[in-house]
């Protein structure tokens, strides 16, 4: 157990060091944006909000939209439906864009598993002249502000409610409380020792 504990401490120290280097690089460098003037505004917004690795992934998706064609299939009230395809290829992706709440959904489901907008959705946003990534599609974990945000407190509706909660809610409450405790304890050596 002692050997395992020492090894895990070394691994954690390495991870903390890599994270510090990454934070430093994020604050003092900017990724190289390769795009036309029309694309630049969206890519600059991505550079402002995303951490460098995610900005680079988004850029790879976004810079190829010039090779794609978006054809409007239908429009009902504020929802537009497009078929997006690569030039000269018959495979099409159906993209729905709701103008009222700025939500976009592509049948490739890239956002669902990779958490960045796909090239098909980006093509439709470009066609609709949207020059900033909708806030719905900027996940906290990929944003530069992720560390700066404080975890909000958890409050029950009534004092007895925590007793009646499901096991999942109780677990969630304990996790939030633990995160808040460690967040506060991180600023003081004595509290850190008590938390450990």
Image: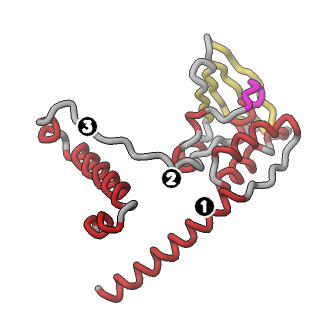
Q: Residues within 10 Å of mark 3 (few under 14, many from 20)?
A: few
Residue 79 picture quarter? top right
Residue 126 position within the rendered picture, expressed as x and y whole percent measured from the top left? 76, 31
Count every numbered label the image shows and give the total: 3
Task: Give the residue at mark 2.
Answer: 147
Q: Is residue 98 left or right of residue 12?
A: right
In this view, the residue in front, 105 or 3, is 3
Task: Give the residue at mark 1.
Answer: 23
Q: Is tag 3's residue or tag 1's residue first in the polypeptide sequence?
A: 1
Q: Are marks 2 and 3 in contact (CB under 8 Å)?
A: no
Q: Is residue 191 left or right of residue 45?
A: left
Residue 25 position within the rendered picture, expressed as x and y whole percent measured from the top left? 67, 62
**Residue 26 in view in this figure:** yes
- The quadrant of the rendering that contains the C terminus is bottom left
**Residue 124 in view in this figure:** no
- Residue visible at 40% across and 79% down? 8
């Amino acid at each position: 157990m002692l050997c395992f504990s020492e090894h895990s401490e070394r691994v954690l120290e390495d991870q903390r060091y890599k994270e510090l280097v990454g934070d430093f690089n994020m604050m003092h460098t900017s990724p190289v944006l390769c795009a036309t003037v029309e694309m630049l505004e969206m890519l600059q917004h991505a550079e402002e909000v995303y951490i460098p690795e995610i900005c680079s992934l988004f850029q790879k998706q976004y810079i190829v939209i010039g090779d794609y064609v978006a054809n409007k299939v239908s429009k009902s009230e504020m929802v537009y439906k497009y078929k997006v395809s690569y030039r000269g290829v018959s495979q099409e992706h159906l993209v729905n864009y709701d103008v009222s709440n700025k939500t976009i959904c592509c049948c490739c489901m890239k956002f669902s598993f990779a958490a960045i907008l796909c090239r098909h959705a980006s093509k439709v946003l470009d066609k609709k002249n949207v020059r900033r990534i909708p806030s719905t599609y900027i996940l906290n974990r990929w944003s530069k502000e992720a560390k700066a945000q404080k975890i909000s407190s958890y409050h029950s509706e009534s004092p007895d409610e925590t007793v009646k909660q499901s096991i999942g809610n109780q677990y969630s409450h304990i996790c939030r409380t633990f995160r808040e405790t460690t967040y506060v304890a991180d600023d003081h050596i004595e509290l850190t020792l008590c938390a450990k």
